[in-house]
């Protein structure tokens, strides 16, 4: 019983259990919506959303579809890490989408106009994303502008700035609203496949971005938990005034945190566009959903860099699965609905943990040292013991007062 309670009390186990509960509830609500639209195919549709690439007819097709999902998981994971890193330092980086746009702009411009190789493009993308993040951090540190407000504004500013820059010169395909394909504009800017291309049925979009994104997740976990630098950042997030009193440069830490978050999101954009999977549309009028999907992956992963790896894959998998359902009956956005419900439910993770701990504490009983019987909750027994001690002390004080009165009367 003690081992079971200790497992349920474990924060990591509680985080996993809460995330699974969010997933189950999200899928259940999504299934109910499908039933309302058309009950006949609801079961098959929710199965398709869940299985995604496993629904393909042949094994090579399944492996290639898995490669496509992994190719889009890498940039999603980087955006999720951006949000997770900043959140651990007490900042909500909702501006990851704008930093992602800055990285896409810088990476594609470097590749298509400047003719840079892929590794230089990644560095430039990181710098561009870091610059946008640092701007939001500067406003937060020195002008007390909430990072959510500045982040949302920068998302739209960077969207139209990116459209403007990439719609001119060599970057723009004159026959379409998209940028030039990197494979034809500058093949040296394509991320190398390594051995992954052969593993995933010669899928050209499967590159080292997948491995690099996982390494970034491990690196972020090490920085936050194993280094002095990470400790100072987390201390600033907990209480910037206490951090300042302890000699930490809290303003600098805020700017550095958002700059690192921006760099991660910026690199994430290059992990998508420098694989040749898709091109940037210079006429789009909505902020890319990659940054916002990163919020779902972050919270579903329990705000842990390693958990975010699995959560990012799940979010991207159900998103791709939603595109495979019968669109003549159901909208493909049903997967986005499920993701949004999961995001909403993730806001109740702390509530789930609080409820779980209350149930465990209520059921916990201690064994009496005298006769081995269950005497109730430890909190209640402590209260009873304190009341008994207080009664004994009061009785002793009353006896002393009566003795003093008698002695005074005799004198």
Image: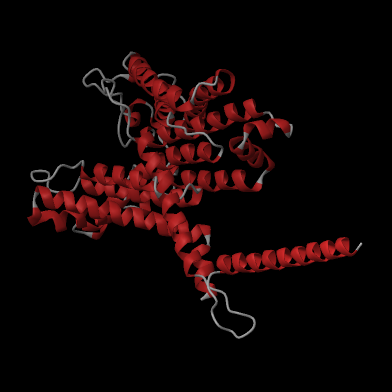
Residue 237 is situated, as x and y percent measured from the top left of the image, at: 59, 36
Horizontal side of 304 relative to 249 (left or right) equals: left
Which residue occupies the extreme front position in the image?
A: 410
Front-most of 299 and 122?
Answer: 299
Horizontal side of 194 relative to 345 (left or right) equals: right
Front-most of 205 and 149?
Answer: 149
- Quadrant for residue 246, please give it: top right
Q: Residue at x 50, y 23 (%)?
A: 136
Residue 195 seen from this side: no
Horizontal side of 230 relative to 264 (left or right) equals: right
Q: Residue at x 66, y 38 (%)?
A: 232
- Quadrant for residue 292, please give it: top left
Which residue occupies the extreme right position in the image?
A: 411
Residue 164 seen from this side: yes
The vertical placement of 328 against 263, above or below, is below
Q: Residue at x 61, y 40 (%)?
A: 234
Residue 312 is situated, as x and y percent measured from the top left of the image, at: 39, 47
Residue 149 is situated, as x and y percent measured from the top left of the image, at: 43, 23
Colour option used: secondary structure
Front-most of 322 and 303?
Answer: 303
Please state, as top left, top right, bottom left or bottom right, where the C terminus lies in the image.
bottom right
- Quadrant for residue 44, please give it: bottom left
The vertical placement of 318 against 179, above or below, is below
The vertical placement of 294 against 142, above or below, is below
How many labels sit on residues? 0
Which residue occupies the extreme bottom position in the image?
A: 371
Horizontal side of 304 relative to 331 (left or right) equals: right
Residue 48 is situated, as x and y percent measured from the top left of the image, at: 20, 54
The vertical placement of 394 against 66, above or below, is below
Front-most of 342 and 291?
Answer: 342
């Amino acid at each position: 019983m003690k081992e079971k309670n200790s497992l349920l009390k474990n924060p990591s186990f509680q985080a996993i259990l809460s995330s699974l509960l969010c997933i189950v509830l999200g899928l259940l609500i999504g299934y109910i919506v499908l039933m309302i639209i058309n009950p006949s195919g609801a079961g098959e549709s929710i199965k398709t959303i869940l299985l995604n690439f496993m629904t393909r007819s042949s094994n090579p097709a399944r492996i290639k579809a898995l490669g496509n999902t992994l190719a889009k998981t890498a940039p999603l994971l980087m955006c999720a890490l951006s949000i997770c890193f900043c959140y651990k330092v007490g900042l909500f980086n909702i501006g990851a989408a704008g930093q992602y746009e800055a990285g896409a702009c810088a990476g594609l411009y470097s590749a298509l106009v400047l003719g840079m190789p892929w590794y230089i493009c990644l560095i430039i993308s990181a710098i561009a994303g870091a610059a946008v993040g640092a701007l939001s951090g500067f406003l937060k540190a020195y002008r007390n502008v909430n990072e959510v407000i500045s982040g949302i504004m920068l998302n739209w500013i960077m969207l139209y700035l990116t459209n403007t820059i990439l719609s001119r010169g060599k970057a723009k395909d004159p026959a379409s609203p998209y940028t030039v394909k990197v494979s034809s504009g500058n093949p040296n800017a394509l991320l190398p496949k390594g051995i992954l291309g052969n593993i995933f049925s010669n899928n050209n979009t499967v590159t080292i971005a997948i491995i690099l994104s996982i390494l970034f997740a491990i690196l972020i976990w090490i920085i936050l938990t194993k280094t002095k630098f990470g400790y100072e950042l987390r201390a600033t997030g907990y209480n910037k005034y206490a951090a300042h009193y302890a000699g930490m440069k809290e303003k600098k830490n805020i700017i550095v945190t958002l700059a690192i978050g921006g760099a991660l999101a910026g690199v994430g954009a290059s992990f998508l566009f420098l694989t040749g999977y898709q091109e940037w549309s210079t006429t789009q009028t909505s902020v890319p959903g990659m940054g916002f999907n990163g919020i779902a992956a972050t919270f579903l992963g329990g705000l842990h860099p390693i958990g975010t790896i699995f959560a990012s894959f799940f979010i991207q998998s159900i998103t791709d699965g939603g595109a495979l359902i019968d669109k003549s009956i159901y909208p493909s956005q049903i997967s986005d609905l499920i993701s949004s419900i999961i995001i909403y439910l993730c806001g109740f993770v702390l509530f789930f943990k609080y409820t779980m701990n209350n149930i465990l504490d209520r059921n916990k009983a201690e064994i009496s040292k005298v006769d081995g019987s269950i005497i109730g909750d430890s909190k209640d027994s402590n209260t009873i013991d304190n009341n008994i001690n207080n009664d004994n002390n009061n009785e002793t004080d009353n006896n002393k007062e009566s003795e003093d009165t008698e002695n005074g009367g005799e004198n």
